[in-house]
Amino acid sequence: MSFRKPNVLPGFGLTFGFTIFFLSAIVLLPLAALVLAAASMHWSEFVAMVSSPRALGSYRLSFGASALAASINAVFGFVIAWTLVRYEFPGRRLIDALIDMPFALPTAVSGIALTTVFAQHGWIGRYLEPLGIKVAYTWLGVTLALTLISMPFAVRAMQPALLEVQHDLEEAAETLGAGRFYAFRRIILPTVLPALLTGFTLAFARAVGEYGSVIFIAGNLPMKTEITPLLIVIHLEQFDYRGAAALGVVMLLMSFVVLLAINLLQAWNRRRHARAAH
Amino acid sequence: MAGRLPVAAALAVLQGDAATRPGQNTWLSALVRWLFIATSLAFLAALLIAPLVTVFAMALERGFEAYLVSFADPDTQAAIRLTLITAAVVVPINIVFGLAAAWAIAKFEFRGKSMLITLIDLPLAVSPVISGMVFVLLFGLHGWFGVWLQRHDISVIFALPGIMLATMFVTFPYVARELIPLMQQLGNDEEEAAITLGAGGWMTFFKVTLPKIRWGLLYGVILSNARAMGEFGAVSVVSGHIRGLTTTMPLQIEILYNEYNFVGAFAVASLLTLLAVVTLEVKTLVERTGYRGR
Amino acid sequence: MSITLDQVTKHYGGVPVVNDVSLDIGDGEFFVLLGPSGSGKSTLLRAIAGLTGVDYGRISLHGRDVTEVAARKRGVGLVFQNYALFRHMTVADNIEFALRVRHMRASHRRERRRELLRLVALEGMDDRLPAQLSGGQQQRVAVARALAHKPEVLLLDEPFGALDAKIREELRRTIREVQRELGITTVLVTHDQEEAFAMADRLGIMNLGRLLEAGVPHELYSRPATRFVATFLGAANLFLARNGAEGIHVGAATIASHEHSPQPREHEVVAVVRPEEVVVAATPAELGSRFVAQGVVDEMVFAGALERLRLRLEDGSAAPLLATADAAATPYLEVTRTQPEQRAFELHPGQSVAIGVRRVHVLPTPLSSFTACAASSAAAETLARQPLLAELAARMKTRIGIRPEPQLGASAAGPEESAPFVGATVISCEPQAAQRAEWLLRHGANEVLVLPAQATVPQRVLIHWMDEAVRPATLAVSESVLRHVPAEAEYVGTLSREVAQELARRLSEAPGQMLIVGVSDLARFAERFSPLLDGGRWPVLVVHRAPS
């Protein structure tokens, strides 16, 4: 079998060649440079770099806060997606459009705005302060920033899945004697589950790498409120390229694991659909 | 719009119609509905709307005049200029790449296609800090080509080329991602018709393909532009933060904010926020023109 | 000739989707390619247009070999199933596209456009966008656009697929009128036989990538050569009849058909009886000599001008008359009656009737049915369930008989006078298969299929004949087999070494192969063919004709 199926449309060589060239020059070669830089280190040196107490502390915050943010988004993302798909209310279209805001808004803007709102004297921060809840400059703030920037990924992953749960499916369940919550648990939730997991994973992936919005609200205390990307920047600013590359490889591996998880989830979803079609 | 139907059905049930159905717990439906809407609105208000309003409230805290004055700062003006230049270079390159990648991927069947799509999406999965760092490793003072570049007196890192490279890395997938599914959905029929009518490759592309994907392309370009102008992490790593020289708008926001010049910081932020609003507006418009359907 | 196809072959993923198609289409002819979906007809049309390349064979347009010519330089007009109008261009721009490409002057373009819009009855629609037109109007624009550059050939790919019945009718008439007026050679692809009859000067029927038959519609309808064409072009009852000295025996009837050539030895044939050629009466006497069997009315459906009947053959022994793959299923006879016929003899479900036939057509196919033959009836029944045999019978819409033969393969001559062997005799691949095959061939079997238990539908069929005397028979049987499997044929020429060994070697080279071999000389058959047949892993069909 040949590499490509024949087709009368011209331009495959040109466009394919350009795509590969540009992709290699801008993305693949630079990423390879990162991996090579880490690979040129001695194994023990690499391990020491990536398992220093400060690095471990940053992983705890980065991965922990990202997982928490993705979980929050799985729950609230579901509620929001459900609301947008199922209910009509004034301003629904506006809200629907606003969901993409964190995606279009520069992270630095999100960062300073969120910090201002949740600071001690901010619009919301001032009501939390008496309750003993400190958001800005704590891990809570980090989680909040990550929740904001990863929110669209969770909502947008679930919306089409909820649209697909045809209402007549529920009605059918109802005519068969199912109660409303039973129908929700047995019909809607299983149908939406792959999308929910995909949404969680996408949100997590986006959150782990986030830098711009977090550094404003985090406080950036080593071991406490220092995320891994910031630690990389600190290494770079001290011209410690090897340390930065080592941490970079750890994060890159994390990205690959997440990408793999997303692909597996989507394959799983497709299989479920394929089976349902038969 | 296949999706509208179930929504309409759901609405009919959850609103007035519910009363006509025997045995339906109307007040429970209403309660659930109210609870869902209230939760969604509260969540979005705290996390999204409050910060958005804050941007403009803080920018205008000292009045409109102070807001305008903050743009008179030469460093801020330089940052705006640098951002515009970067976008002006990066976005056209992204358009060419996006069109080429979408043509190759959507119009042809070849082995390793899904692998190629994954690779194009790769920058979205990589932390922006890493996106910037890879160029530091290549072109930085202690990087692979650092010595060579220094000998030839070429600066990439802490200079305009580095900023452009990092921005390109980050914004690289957007046009292609928007066009690939669109072109796949529109199919090859019209192009094949053009060819049987005697048109050549370029003619087919410019007269047939380009007009039918123009709305999708527009959104891809606007989105790619918004990301290019707003990128912080990757640019921050390669820029060196030289005031008035290698500081883009997001970096200028950081500098002003850290100097407690809140009005100045939020004034610049308000420009980028407006850009984001315009981007979303274009997206909504493009979706409403129904470019995805026939 | 306007369009000449010579052995055109096209594969997708190793499967031939267009398989060895040769065809001549004359100047100004309206040719319809008819076939079920997946039969390769659209691929063939795209190959003529140049949108799909071919793996083998040549395509000529007006004597010019265009096999390697790009689509844009072939000068054909193609109308797509989904119109494929340029959605962002007006009707005028769509139609003028081909003229712009050719740098025609604006005034000439305008003139040509007016002419075309008049032709398809869309005057004044110039400035509409495709989205503002109805489906039928869009397709008219597509036709006008395809004709703009005065192509030598017009190709239409299921152009009415997305339209409702009334508009379809109207558009058919328009296209036929336009075609007559311009005298342009036209090829239309469809899966709708009514449409094919309505439009075609000549008709070609495709199945499994092969062009089975081509001809004038009424010829193909009344005298099909293959089972597929007989059943695809309208309804048909397939009978297993016997062709003998006095005529064709269908059940109790003997019909002297003008196609009948007196046969010295009676043999089984497949006879086609159209539903309108079946007659029913209260008693056999009323039918006269045409009486076939007794039947019961199973179902009656009012269908406007005609009445559709489904009859069950009552007599148990008459059931094998009808060719069906599934022996267990009750075979039904389809009958249509006109209003006068209905008034003359009124029927009700459950009524017992005498069934007769007015006219039969005998298919020239050499493979009528299969008979699974083994030493015990249990073994024969197991053999009848073999996957390849079951598949072949299903595709051929024919029957698998069971025949226990305790003497099978015995070297000592048993009682000589047994019932004649009908159809192709099937035996399983066993150590003594060659010996058994020889026994069967010597006892009057014309075709013997030796089947391994695991054999499935082949991808390639090797064909070889031992001498010229059996060549026509071998080719006829091969064609019949190849019509029902999407396989490639490979003719194995003169072999240098010992024939059986050489054939066995070729068969062992790749899985999924089958062999059809013609023999006339049975001397030392078992010995010669032992390496090929005894315990082989491939199906072999032996065709035997005694030299005349």
Image (cartoon, grey):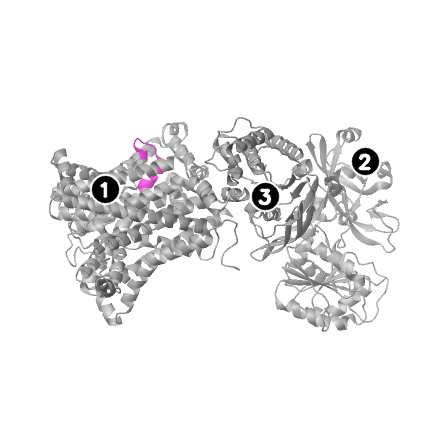
Is C367 placed above or below C105 here? Answer: below
Name which residue type carries label 3. Gly
Query: In the image, is residue A97 part of the stretch drawn in magenta?
Result: no
Q: Could you tell me what secondary structure mostly forms the magenta stretch?
A: helix
Task: Sort mark 1 into few (<14), some (14-19) or many (20+) by Cα contacts within 10 Å.
Answer: many
In the image, is C358 to the left or to the right of B36? right
Label 3 element class:
loop
Q: Chain of mark 1?
A: B
Q: Position of residue C496 (x, y in %)?
A: 72, 72
In the image, is C167 to the left or to the right of B289? right
- Residue at 39%, 44% in the rendered image: A161
- Residue at 34%, 37% in the rendered image: B284
Label 1 element class:
helix
Q: Can the viewer see residue C100 in this picture?
A: yes
Mark before the other along the chain sequence, 2 or 3: 3
Which mark, by number, is residue B272?
1
Q: Chain of mark 2?
A: C
Dot 1 and dot 2 within a common chain:
no
| Front of the two marks 2 and 3 | 3
| Front of the two marks 1 and 3 | 3
Name which residue type carries label 1. Leu
Q: CA distance from mark 1 to mark 3?
A: 54 Å
Of residue C164 and residue A119, the one placed in the foreground of this image is: C164
Residue with the mark numbered 2: C281
User: Range of the magenta residues?
Assistant: A79-93
Residue with the mark numbered 3: C75
Q: Position of residue B139 (x, y in %)?
A: 25, 61
- Farthest residue toward the top? C124
Of residue C143 and residue C365, the one placed in the foreground of this image is: C143
Of residue C74 and residue C136, the one placed in the foreground of this image is: C74
| Front of the two marks 1 and 2 | 1
Q: Position of residue B51 (x, y in %)?
A: 20, 41
